[in-house]
Image: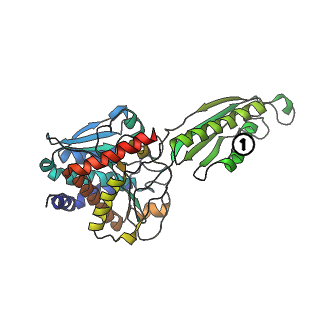
Amino acid sequence: MSKQLALAVIEQQADAFRDIATKIGRQPELGHQEYFASGLLTDMLALAGFEVEKGVLGLETAFLAVYDTGKPGAVVAFLCEYDALEGLGHACGHHLIGTMSAAAAIGLKAVADELGGVIRVYGTPAEETKGAKVPMAEAGLFDDCDIALMAHPYHSFERSGQSLALDPVRFEFSGLAAHAAASPHEGINALDAVLALFGSVNALRQQTRSDARIHGIIDNGGTAPNIIPDYASAKFYVRSASRAYTNELTAKVKRCAEAAALATGCGLQVSSYEYSYDELMTNEILSETFMSNLAQAGIAPEEVQDGKDHGSLDLGNVSKRCPAIHPYVKIVEDRLLLHTEAFRDAAMTDAALDRMLVGAKLLAATAYDVMADGELRAAIREEFRQRTSTAL
């Protein structure tokens, strides 16, 4: 009955949760600028009896909300995201993710004193760019967690699967300006170096694994066609299914840039313009616990897709610190793609808000199972221990 009470609390406060998600969705904010969204979520959690710390690690829109029963037991983490996409708003549904995780924690708190342990809600800004989970993981904020949970809105139900490790690399080439018609021989063309870099990377792709992804843009290619560009730059994402292979790929791409600089006589500066993300390591026992609750909620197995690669997540860094999952929850009927206007608009409908509450209940029920069952916790932790030791 205790699990049902937790779910009932979510249902009882459904209108408030829908209102929070709608307000965040209507006022999208970019990463590390989510003052409105983080404020709404922290106010709601504080009102529910959580102790809230704002500005975690000096990140103004990050937060940590904690309910400690004062009794021994599991430490469970719910992860909130609430940043929007530039020019698209909440086309990835983060207004739903943040509210979903907070709602799950509030529902679980209603029965936590019976179970013992600690409930934490991590407010993690900027998942789309400089994801706060990266410095949080590096600072050890997840190291004592038994589990870390979040769910992502999508056009279908999907098991927690994989993601790609990611390195964001910027290459800046410096040359020498000259009149492109009168004295081109006096110049050193920085744009030529960028073009040579792209040519080398295109050739490199032929000798990479099938899980590799290397894609880039020229963010500065000069100022005018009659001036030899003395500065040009490009941004790349280098990805693969493992951190080790991504490191290899990034080193090769950097050598392509060094060769381009040498060939054109340009100077070169290399930097990381965002955080590097590790690949997601789904804890399969924890994932099965979520799937069991999905089945109990009436979702037939044939309605659930296997876990797929959807790109890169800063949750990958968390999954190397504690057992974690990242399933997908169906919020729309049509096959709408993430990061599109169509998905953004659909994610604001009443149907999507109702499905958000389904996701909150699934997260709360999964966390309840872990808090209530010491043997399950031990099995989850042992799988994590074995997989991390193997990875080393």
Closer-to-camera residue (8/384): 384
On the rendered structure, is 116 left or right of 367? left
Quadrant containing the C terminus is: top left
Closer-to-camera residue (354/246): 246
x and y, in percent, of residue 27 in the image: 38, 52
At label 1, the amino acid type is Ser
x and y, in percent, of residue 268 in the image: 67, 29
Query: To which quarter of the image does residue 142 belong?
Result: top left
On the rendered structure, is 329 left or right of 42? right
| Residue drawn at point x = 32 percent, y = 56 percent | 21
User: Is residue 125 among the parts visible in the rendering?
Assistant: no
User: Is residue 388 among the parts visible in the rendering?
Assistant: yes
Within 10 Å of the Cα at label 1, are there few (<14), some (14-19), or many (20+) other Cα atoms? Answer: some
x and y, in percent, of residue 143 in the image: 32, 37
| Residue drawn at point x = 56 percent, y = 46 percent | 239
Callout 1 secondary element: helix
Colour mapping used in the image: rainbow
Instruction: Give the labeled residue for mark 1.
Output: 200
On the rendered structure, is 112 left or right of 76? left
| Residue drawn at point x = 50 percent, y = 60 percent | 340
Query: To which quarter of the image does residue 264 belong?
Result: top right
Query: To which quarter of the image does residue 199 belong?
Result: top right
On the rendered structure, is 268 left or right of 127? right
